[in-house]
Image (cartoon, grey):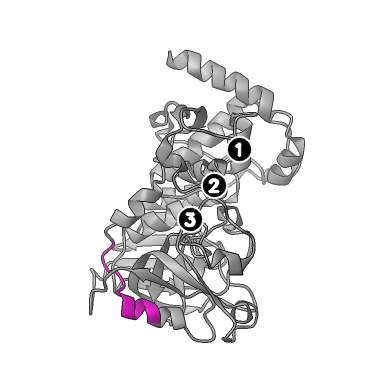
Amino acid sequence: MQSFVRLAITAMISCSLLGTAAAEKKQSGGAQKRSPADIEAATRLQIFLDRANFGPGKLDGYYGEFTRKALALYRESRGEAAPAAPAGKAEALPDVTGLDLASVDPVFITYTVTDADLENVGELPTEVAAQAKLKALPYRDAAEALSEKFHSDPDFLEQLNPGKMKDIKAGDELQVPNVEPFELAAVKDLKPGSEINPSVANEIAEGEPGGAEKPAGDAQEQTGASTSPQMTVTVDMKTNMLAVYDNEKVVAAYPVTIGSEQTESPVGEWKVRGVAKMPTFRYDEKMLNEGERSDDFHMLPPGPNNPVGVIWIALNKKGIGLHGTAAPDSIGRSASHGCIRLANWDVVRLAGKIKGGVPVSIQ
């Protein structure tokens, strides 16, 4: 049965993906079209890394830059040197020697859409003022919700499911990457080591010039919280990768977006102050664009399409934190307003690993 499903998926990929020449050129510098086997192999590696907590970014079936960076950090975690690319072959396939890629089987699975998948889908106006009047900022449609659930590029899910990603309803069956799903409903049950109480959250929400993204959230703070000094976080602004170290050994890594030249991320040594789940966001256009507060702002409610996503990890730099995003496609490819932005599925995993007092080095 698995062989039949795999053959069916391969045929589907063959029909839907081999004609994407423009995407091929954008992603691989004009490389030749890939076979369905090539696409499956790249997705297998991405899933393997994602399961190991070395995030390759959104799953798209390519050996992209974040897949390669995540692989290098994964090898570092095992005490292995990253193999050098063959001379003159910048687009050479990554060396996967020694990886247990057979553990990812099958690469794609059949998923049946549930009512719960559609609970957080609704109308989302484009105007900020209208968004501020809502109780929550939902997914725009089921395709967006399912793309985030399976850590995937929406176009990739469309290519896997041609003609099926519109008007999705409960009971529909889709082909999806075999990752551990991101469950929005589970965010409220996350148990980070240090949570922010309303008074601290409000202080963050007020913020100061120099930090443009300042949410508030419902949680409790551990006063004077601390953790083992062996646990540290490093944000490398040159590679756009965040790495988690335990006793100086890298144990997880995720791609990030950093600040722009206008609102730079604060280089230096900081500490985690606490975590807020399902935060609100103070939208102040002057602060976002110029780094100066104004009285013209809107408080945006929580939800997956909140500008800071579903988790805010506060640092002891007022108004600056590590947080999720409403636009996972932007990770590593656009500038934030001073904070460190991760995909929602990655920031939830990060929040589950760190506690108040954990050092965060932005360099």
- Where does residue 111 sit, x and y in percent of width and height? 45, 29
| Residue 190 in the image: above or below residue 8 | below
Spot occupied by residue 120 in the image (x, y as percentages of width and height): 46, 48
**Foreground of the two, 101 or 93:** 101
Check disc 3 and report its element: helix, strand or loop: loop
Question: Which residue is identified by label 3?
Answer: 304
Is residue 61 in view? no
User: Considering the numbered disc 1 on the image, is that residue within a helix, a strand or a loop?
Assistant: helix
Cβ atoms under marks 2 and 1 closer than 8 Å: yes
The residue beneath circle 1 is 156
Q: Which residues are magenta?
A: 192-202
Disc 3 to disc 2, C-alpha distance: 16 Å
Three-letter amino acid code of the residue under disc 2: Lys
Please report contact status of discs 3 and 2: CB closer than 8 Å, yes or no.
no
* Mark seen at residue 295: none
Q: Which amino acid does the dot numbered 3 rest on?
A: Pro
Tell me, for residue 58, which label it has, or none.
2
| Mark 2 vs mark 1, CA separation in Å | 10 Å
Q: Residue at x 46, y 62 (%)?
A: 135
In this rendering, is residue 316 above or below 51?
Answer: below
Of the numbered discs 3 and 2, the one sitting upstream in the chain is: 2
Residue toward you, 169 or 52: 169
Between marks 3 and 1, how big is the CA–CA gap?
Answer: 20 Å
Frontmost of labels 3 and 2 is 3
- On whether residue 99 falls in the magenta region, the answer is no
Examine the structure image and report whether residue 196 is included in the region drawn in magenta: yes
